[in-house]
Image (cartoon, rainbow, N blue to C red):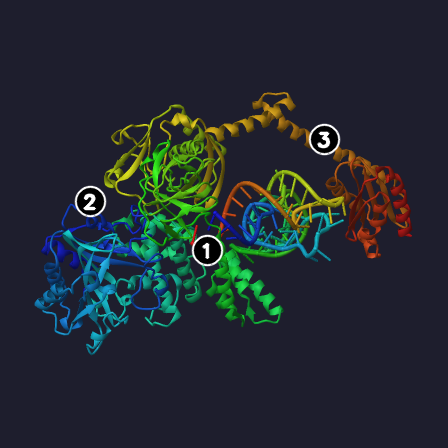
RNA sequence: GGGGGAGUAGCUCAACUGGUAGAGCACCUGCUUUGCAAGCAGGGGGUCAGGGGUUCGAAUCCCCUCUUCUCCA
């Protein structure tokens, strides 16, 4: 029986040694340069540019094994993992590729040769499918492929026709596409699998798909043949291993055996038995699968967090942790201990795993600990809710409670359900779903002011190349969008709101973190016509000018004149260029780990999110500001170039935002060097379609206003420039001047002066305390004893109730039995306290009651507990009278 | 982007309806026992995250800021 490593190698050797292919390493499973993808999910990801024709391949035939993750996004297998024999969030895709080289005959012949020759699979167990054709689209049935299959020896009755969904492959809405032919393996004992092809059975499973890319899908949905034809194949490595090792489940192969053993050893659970409906076995499969995903994703540079792909990884980790805890009885972090097993097993085909496994293990460990902490807290909260539920004589935990546990404390619903079961309770799942829906709705509503997601009718393209300049241009009205429908007739009248569509524009549509422009559009031929633009957004290649007709009317075909709000636009440009300098400054000052995580640039500020795991110190902020201001002071030129994406990536010091979509060619903005070749790693070089000032001097001045955390490991700083920075400085200086006038000192002396005041206050408080102690000692000495109880009544110097309370303890210690009443004059109010020693409390006296009539005497109120009460009044003149009354009251009470 | 929590001794957390901030662990001192674990007695340790407000009185109620956790997009 071949090992999985041998199988992988045999595939690669077959194409590389026997058929002239070149081996190409897998691209990272975290596609850093293709932000449209959450994770690499197919072997073709890294070859996309070859099919699109935007890049020339180095070799025309290659073979590879691609690391893939399908979790989140379009292909999401996350919830299926564990429940069957063949779903994975992480898997390998073996592939052979022709870029304009060989086509159907070779691809099919070699596939057959590898399967039935090299691997000696019984041809009776193989079924193939070919495309049935699509007359509506003018694509004929793929008889060519069927004929080749026949000629290589596929059994009659083993060639099936497949529909568009299964046998016509498209990369996206437009672009290269073509028919494909799939090979399925029939594992039924009696070879009865023909009818199960594409039937969703795990007895007959697709093992290899050969795609023949020969058309281009045009935007008008028509197809044109490509000048060059390509082959793109993908074979599920785990599936072929299962077949060649004669197993009935991918999880029974030697790919998973070492992981299962490692899981058993770290959790001390009973061994894996391969049952489909056994919770313990499901847990084994989930954990083995998820640790592979986590190890590869983290190795390739992903992080665990709260956004996008980071959040997917967090959910995967927590799902695995949960299965371990619920089904295998783990009680502490254990997933991290499995990393070495993954590294050992796959470190040879994927050497990147060996680069820094300790870091990966650390990341997993840290997140496990965080999750377990949450879990403990959640369990505690759950117990409280369970008690509450039982106390209310109910056996159902409300949906609201269950949802709160999840929403606020991250306690998953199935854990809640399990815990409830153990307590003889159930959970109102319907109510939970309702709460969840309501919460989602709430989150959605907090979105944007203007939203257009889809428009009925064809949207024309807008030429927005004039957007980089700040000057008035003319354009033609093509129509407008109202209620998500494109309108191209009639008049847009005064008072109406719409999204205006023009043939060209100088308005910048919101993109790359820069806000859309505002401004006015009028008709030079007809005075009084004015459309006020409140926001500008882009939908595909169309620029939408959202706004309101203030006066007059507009018709399709009118020539209009466009003015961006000039001052606002220049403010935006200042902020955008400053953002680039800030990006560079953060990295320079804080270190290379700083990555841009997002930004928002508008006329008032620049807001920048970046990876950094602790608050910035005052010194950090100062150094970053001075770095940026230094570059502003040098009045560096800002220039932009359109470069092919590949070439642009090679420019020294280039920064691209992860998660951002870049066109090819891409616009590169340089600050300092005037040519891409002149750039160094100390210069700001960014892919950016935004608008910038011509020289950094225009920014004027840069000032960081605030910083805050956004998510774990991500911080946000907000800064201002130009006019806003000047305004901020003026305000600051006004405040400082007010202080220097008050203290008659220089600004730099302020900290010392204020600190001195602080010390002075402390010193005076000490004095007061001492005076207070002396007064109290005097009162104590002079206090009459009534029936063994000291009656301590008197007026104190104003020292604050905190200090008085501290002294009360002293009195209670000195005099075993005491009835204490103190009052003092604080100017605007007159506080009063009554304190009783325990013996008096036992006799039934209540300070809280005794104090009330006294408080009334000085025009106030109060209350407290039996041994201590406080009150306050306003009438200081009545203080002696009140104290006399208190003495009377005390003496009475003690008799 | 929107929602919900949390922040109290070095650590983990209490404090009822607003009424003198506590416990366990850790630490220090002493005693006892001793192979180890420990036991007993005493003690130190607080800007109740910070600021403002309401109140006679705020850890507690309200507002703002900071830090942190969590869910959704």
Can you see residue A134? Answer: no
The quadrant holding residue A581 is top left
Q: Which of the labelled discs sits on residue A764, or is there none? A: 3
Task: Give the left or right position of residue A60, taking residue A520 as reference.
Answer: left
Q: How crowded is mark 1: few (under 14 residues within 10 Å), some or many (20 or more)?
A: many
Residue A269 coordinates in the image, percent (x, y):
39, 66
Would residue A119 appear left or right of A852 to someone viewing this image? left
- Mark 1 → mark 3, Cα distance in angstroms: 50 Å
State if disc 2 and disc 3 touch (CB < 8 Å).
no
Q: Position of residue A69 (x, y in %)?
A: 31, 56
Q: Are marks 1 and 2 on the same chain?
A: yes
**Viewer-proximal residue among A87 and A217:** A217
**Residue A55 marker:** 2
Q: Which of marks 3 and 2 is nearer the N terminus?
A: 2
Q: How far apart are marks 3 and 2 (CA)?
A: 79 Å
Query: How far is mark 1 from mark 2, CA to CA?
Result: 44 Å
User: Looking at the image, do the residues carrying marks 1 and 3 touch, with CB atoms under 8 Å apart?
Assistant: no
Q: Which residue is drawn at 78% across and 39% down?
A: A829
Sequence-wise, which precedes: disc 1 or disc 2?
2
Q: Specify whether residue A250 is in view.
A: yes
Q: What is the quadrant of the N terminus of chain A in the image?
A: bottom left
| Residue A125 locus on image (x, y percent) | 17, 72
Residue B18 image offset from top left, x and y in percent: 71, 52
Helix, strand or loop at mark 3: helix
**Disc 3 or disc 2, which is closer to the eye?**
2
Q: Mark 1 points at which residue?
A: A371
Residue furthest to the left: A151
């Amino acid at each position: 029986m071949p090992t999985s490593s041998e199988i992988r190698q045999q595939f690669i050797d077959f194409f590389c040694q026997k058929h002239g292919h070149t081996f190409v390493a897998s691209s990272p499973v975290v596609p850093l340069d293709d932000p449209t993808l959450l994770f690499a999910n197919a072997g073709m990801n890294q070859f996309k540019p070859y099919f699109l024709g935007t890049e020339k391949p180095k070799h025309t035939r290659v073979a590879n094994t691609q690391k893939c993750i399908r979790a989140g996004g379009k292909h999401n297998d996350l919830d299926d993992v564990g429940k069957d024999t063949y779903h994975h969030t992480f898997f390998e895709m073996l592939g052979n590729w022709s870029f304009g080289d060989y086509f159907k005959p070779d691809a099919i012949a070699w596939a057959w040769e590898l399967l039935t020759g090299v691997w000696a699979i019984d041809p009776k167990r193989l079924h193939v499918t070919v495309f049935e054709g699509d007359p509506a689209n003018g694509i004929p049935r793929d008889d060519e492929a069927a004929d080749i299959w026949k000629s290589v020896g596929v059994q009659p009755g083993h060639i099936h026709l497949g529909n568009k969904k299964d046998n016509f492959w498209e990369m996206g809405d437009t672009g290269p596409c073509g028919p494909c032919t799939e090979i399925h393996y029939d594992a039924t004992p009696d070879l009865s699998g023909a009818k199960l092809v594409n039937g969703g059975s795990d007895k007959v499973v697709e093992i290899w798909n050969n795609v023949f890319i020969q058309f281009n899908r045009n935007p008008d949905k028509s197809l044109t043949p490509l000048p060059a034809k390509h082959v793109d194949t993908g074979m599920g490595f785990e599936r072929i291993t299962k077949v060649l090792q004669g197993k009935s489940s991918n999880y029974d192969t030697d790919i998973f055996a070492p992981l299962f053993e490692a899981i058993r050893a770290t959790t001390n659970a009973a061994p894996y038995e391969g049952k489909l409906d056994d919770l313990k076995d499901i847990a084994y499969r989930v954990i083995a699968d998820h640790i592979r995903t986590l190890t590869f994703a983290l190795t390739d540079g992903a992080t665990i967090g709260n956004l996008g792909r980071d959040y997917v990884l967090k959910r995967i980790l927590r799902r695995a942790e949960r299965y371990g805890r619920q089904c295998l009885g783990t009680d502490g972090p254990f997933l991290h201990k499995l990393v070495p097993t993954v590294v050992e097993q796959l470190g040879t085909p994927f050497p990147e795993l060996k680069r820094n496994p300790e870091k990966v293990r650390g990341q997993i460990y840290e997140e496990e600990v965080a999750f377990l902490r949450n879990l403990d807290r959640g369990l505690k909260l759950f117990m409280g809710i369970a008690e509450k539920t039982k106390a209310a004589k109910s056996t159902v935990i409300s949906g609201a409670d269950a949802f709160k546990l999840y929403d606020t404390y991250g306690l998953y619903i199935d854990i809640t359900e399990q815990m409830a079961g153990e307590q003889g309770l159930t959970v109102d799942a319907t109510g939970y779903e309702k709460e969840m829906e309501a919460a989602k709705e709430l989150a959605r509503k907090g979105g944007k002011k203007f939203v257009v997601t889809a428009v009925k009718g064809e949207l024309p393209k807008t030429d927005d190349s004039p957007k980089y300049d700040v000057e008035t241009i003319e354009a033609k009205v093509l129509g407008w969008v109202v209620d998500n429908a494109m309108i191209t007739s009639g008049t847009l009248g005064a008072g109406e709101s719409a999204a205006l569509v023009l043939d060209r524009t100088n308005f910048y549509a919101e993109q790359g973190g820069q806000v859309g422009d505002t401004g006015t559009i009028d008709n030079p031929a007809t005075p009084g016509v004015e459309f006020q633009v409140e926001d500008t957004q882009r939908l595909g290649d169309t620029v939408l000018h959202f706004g309101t007709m203030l006066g007059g009317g507009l018709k399709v075909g009118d020539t209009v004149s466009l003015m961006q709000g000039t001052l606002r636009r220049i403010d935006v440009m200042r902020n955008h260029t400053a953002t680039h300098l800030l990006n560079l400054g953060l990295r320079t000052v804080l270190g290379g780990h700083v990555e841009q995580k997002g930004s928002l640039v508008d006329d008032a500020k620049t807001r920048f999110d970046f990876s950094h795991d602790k608050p910035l110190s005052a010194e950090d902020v100062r150094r970053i500001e001075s770095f940026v201001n230094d570059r502003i002071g040098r009045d560096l030129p800002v220039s932009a170039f359109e470069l092919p994406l590949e070439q642009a990536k090679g420019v020294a010091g280039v920064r691209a935002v992860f998660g951002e979509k870049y066109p090819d060619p891409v616009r590169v903005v340089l600050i300092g060097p005037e040519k891409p070749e002149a750039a160094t790693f100390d210069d700001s070089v960014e892919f950016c379609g935004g608008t910038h000032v011509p020289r950094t001097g225009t920014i004027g001045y840069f000032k960081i206003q605030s910083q805050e955390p956004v998510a774990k490991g991500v911080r946000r700083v907000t800064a201002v420039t130009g006019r806003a920075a000047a305004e901020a400085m003026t305000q600051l200086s006004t405040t400082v001047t007010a202080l220097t006038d008050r203290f008659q000192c220089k600004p730099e002396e302020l900290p010392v002066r204020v600190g001195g005041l602080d010390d002075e206050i402390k010193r005076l408080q000490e004095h007061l305390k001492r005076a207070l102690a002396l007064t109290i000692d005097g009162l104590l000495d002079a206090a009459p004893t009534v029936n063994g109880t000291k009656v301590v009544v008197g007026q104190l110097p104003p020292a604050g109730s905190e200090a008085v309370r501290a002294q009360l303890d002293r009195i209670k210690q000195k005099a075993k039995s005491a009835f204490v009443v103190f009052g003092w004059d604080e100017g605007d109010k007159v506080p009063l306290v009554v304190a009783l020693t325990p013996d008096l409390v036992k006799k039934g006296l209540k300070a809280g009651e005794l104090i009330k009539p006294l408080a009334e005497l000085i025009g106030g109120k109060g209350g407290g507990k039996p041994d201590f009460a406080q009150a306050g009044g306003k009438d200081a003149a009545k203080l002696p009278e009140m104290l006399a009354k208190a003495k009377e009251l005390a003496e009475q009470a003690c008799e």
